[in-house]
Amino acid sequence: MYGLNMTEKEKCNFKIIDSTDELKKSVSEIQAYSKDSKHLAVDCEGINLSRTGKLTILTIATKDKVYIFDVLKLGRSGFDEGLRDILEDKSIEKLLVRLNDADSLWHQFSVELNGVLDLQLLEVLHRRRIKSSIWDIMPEIIKRNQKVDHVEHIAGYQRCLELYVGESSALRDKKKGKFELDKDGLVWNRRPLSDTLAKYCCADVTGLFQLYDALMQNEDIIPRLRVASERYANRYRSMTDRNYDKYECNAYLPLEIIPEKGRLDFPSASTPCSKCNRKFPHDEFLPAHLSRGIQKCCVCRRKEIDISRNYRRVSDWGTESNNLPCGFDIGQRLEELFQFSPNEFCEIEFGDLFLLFESLCFSPPFILSAHLSLSSCPFTDLVREDVPQRQM
């Protein structure tokens, strides 16, 4: 078991490093620790943390001490004084929870974060052990991209602490720091760093050791977790360009990240999803969708359903149709379905039919009439006559 060698009542043992001399000494201490111990914990903070944002704080923790490196003061040269060697060393395993850290380090400082164990993925593996899905016992004839209910959520770090660690100093400090962050979006750019934010940095790494202890019940999954963590870190880091839309950035686990039981590889992939552009085996998609270039993986299909639900939730029955927020266009989806031949219609995924049924049952009539020409609908005689027609 890991955890910190300090009780809940003890003050977190941290040090803020903002000079070259302190940097060299701290790097030596971390490297010496890494020779005799398994894991470090790593976290980054900054303004709009991403490749286009600004990384200003790097926190590295051992089980005894937390090192808060002030990247704003140390600058890029700080990574050339030993930090790069630690972060890129594959033999030093690092606990973390956020793939944006890897993206930021690579594109801002050319540091390739290696040896990662992503605890959000470990939480997914833990959840799989204790929860079964009806899709797991469905026949193989049902394609994976139809299983929209099989899509898995990625739990946030604070939520993981609440679920698996419970009330702790890390969770309390995390909540206090979040209150300060909510008040000032540029707080990570201000110096000196407040005591509250320093403790927030500590919470982000000390809690990782506690979370690892709570979730790691079978070390046989470590090889799969290593593969998954590296693949997940490369998910954004390897992209030439990012668009940050809802299909790219969401709280769902992308497909083909965690290898199946008994494997450390993935099937060959050649056909891209039309939304997220990730490639999957060609037979992942239905021929009717491939022929029209509208093939979507089940994660993007699930996100599409979410967009539809949010569209209806924020819509007001008295709102003019041309002022409705952008979202999933129900009428457009109906027209798309009507283009299928009878044979192709039989191949439509369950998720599509569910979404259509849900939309028809719970959407205000004006949404349909605003986007769909009822005269083109093969079910016109089933539509109430008092529903207003769209003006052509």
Image (cartoon, rainbow, N blue to C red):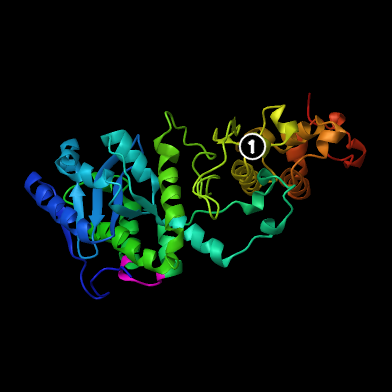
Image coordinates for residue 312, horizontal then vertical, percent: 66, 46
Left or right of 252: which side holds 183?
left
Q: Depth check: give the residue in front, 107 or 386.
A: 107
Percent x, y for residue 315? Answer: 65, 45
In the rendered image, is residue 229 in sight?
A: yes
What residue did someone put label 1 on?
A: 296
Q: Is residue 165 left or right of residue 125?
A: left
Residue in the picture at 19% in, 42% down: 72
Q: Which stretch did the figure color magenta?
A: 165-170
Q: Amino acid at mark 1?
A: Lys
Q: Residue at x 16, y 41 (%)?
A: 78
- The answer to whether residue 49 shows anywhere in this view is no
Q: Is residue 169 magenta?
A: yes
Residue 146 image point, x, y percent: 69, 45
Callout 1: few (<14), some (14-19), or many (20+) C-alpha neighbours within 10 Å? many
Q: Secondary structure at mark 1?
A: loop
241 lies above or below 346: above
Residue that protrudes farthest toward the right in the picture = 381
The one nearer the camera, 105 or 126, is: 126
- Give whichever of 378, 363 is nearer the camera: 378
Tell me: 96 left or right of 276: left
